[in-house]
Amino acid sequence: MTFQKVLIANRGEIALRVIRACRELGLSTVAVHSTADEQALHVRLADEAVCIGPPPATESYLNIPQLIAAAEVTGAEAVHPGYGFLSENAEFAEICAQCGLTFVGPKPEHMGMWGDKVRARALAKRLGLPLMEGSAVLEDEGHAIQEADRIGYPVMLKASGGGGGRGMKICRNAEQLEAAFPQARAEAVAGFKNPDLFIERFVEEPRHIEFQVLCDGEGGVWVLGERECSIQRRHQKLVEEAPSVAMTDELRRATARTIGEAMRDTGYVSAGTLEFLMDEKGNLAFLEMNTRIQVEHPVTEEITGVDLVMEQLRIARGEGVSLGPMEDDLVPLDGWAIEVRVNAEDPETFAPWPGLIDELHVPGGPGVRVDGGIYGGFRVPGAYDSLLMKLIAMGPDRATALRRLQRAVDETLISGIRTNLPLHRRILAHPDFASGALSTRFLSRLD
């Protein structure tokens, strides 16, 4: 499993993040890019770069034959998928293995095991993870109404094969559920090529809490605490922090023990994230597992001192995790970190805003980290996700981290395009944010 050259099957800030980890490990890197990303920062900073197609992702970053060909041409021995695109595609991981490439991530069977939400719910139940009351795969509208009557309204109609808000509908009565069913199914087919739907009890003001894990596949499990990702727009995260003000040490340790047992039971390998909803009473309920590195991983790195991407690479090389045994499988946490995602979009309408960045100034100073993939003079393409960079601030406590993040947002200058920085200023200045009174409906309280 030892390798010296890594092809990064991604773009933007996560591609640059992987390049940095590879450099620290002495590994060579290969960037891939579409014609729209020819001048992207990850292309300019990698050791080698290969164009894999035109701007549409289906013809470039999602084009498996082109990615495999790029690895073969450059002599890459491993593939890091980043997040998004093919990062949770079990078929891609299998093809990499068949072609003699090390896939930096979980085994294909683990990706399939956790990738389907209905199957994941059944597995989570067997493993003793707490669950929100819900249904199996729904046959039709009538079956959905029958299950909703059993669970009790309101319910959330969800796509079994994916996430990101697609195929998700809140239904407060049978009429809404009947109307939403065909819409959700159409979104599920279009987004995930999987028509299966199920429902769960809907919590009005939940917190979104997720736990980061590293696993060596030989019984070693490290739980790196939790992240709070409650501030979202249309189920897309905007602000993340670690730890969560809502989590007690007793609940954290109990959850870490349960997660550790579950990961050992399944033999999971590499990094992963288990996502939960916390209801108004502080009870956790398992949502899904993401078998990849998360966008928001830096806040965990800052409070644990663990380089998660480097650990992914170490595990893939057969070197194991560079941490010793932990009590209750829980890695010690130190301090607080908060992150905002800076997107190229209108701060009021959220419409994407690609274009030329005339000028860029990133913040600095104590306790500030910037993970980005842009520079002054870079043209942001309109074909991909609008994420430009992540601003992360850390401190010995939440109040210090918040003040530093507010300073970092104010110091950031991006001209030529619109960004959501004004929205982040409003979020961070809100008294509910300062007090930690968060939920997934936080944005509705801004106006």
Image (cartoon, grey):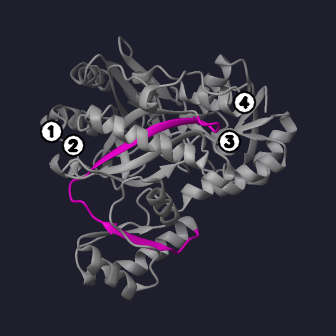
Residue type highlighted by circle 1 = Asp
- Which mark is nearer the camera, 3 or 2? 2
Mark sitting earlier along the chain (3/4):
3
Label 1 or label 3, whichever comes before in sequence order = 3
Q: Horizontal placement of 316 versus 41: left or right?
A: right
For mark 3, give the secondary structure. Answer: loop
Q: Which mark is residue 438?
A: 2
Tell me whether circle 2 and circle 1 mark residues in contact (CB < 8 Å). yes
Q: In the image, which is nearer the foreground, mark 2 or mark 4?
A: 4
Residue position marked by numbered label 3 in the rendering: 9
Question: Would you name the residue on which mark 1 appears?
Answer: 432
- Give the mark nearer the N terminus: 2 vs 1: 1
Counting from the top left corner in percent of width and height, residue 4 is at 79, 25
Q: Position of residue 269 (x, y in %)?
A: 62, 41
Density class for disc 1 (Cα within 10 Å; few <14, some 14-19, many ≥20) is some
Give how far apart the Cα atoms at labels 2 and 1 are: 7 Å
Label 2 vs 4, first from the N-terminus? 4
Point 39% across, 85% down: residue: 143
Is there CB contact under 8 Å for labels 2 and 4? no
Mark 3 or mark 2, which has the lower sequence index?
3
Circle 4 residue: 318
Question: In the displayed structure, would residue 277 be above or below residue 241?
Answer: below
Whether label 3 touches label 2, CB < 8 Å? no
How far apart are labels 3 and 2 at the CA level? 35 Å
Query: Three-letter amino acid code at disc 3?
Result: Ala
Q: Earlier in the sequence, mark 4 or mark 1?
A: 4
Q: Amino acid at mark 2?
A: Leu
User: Residue 41 lies in magenta, yes or no?
Assistant: no
The residue tagged with tag 2: helix, strand or loop? Answer: loop
Q: What range is drawn magenta here?
A: 193-219
Q: CA distance from mark 3 to mark 4?
A: 21 Å
Spatial CA span between label 1 and label 3? 39 Å
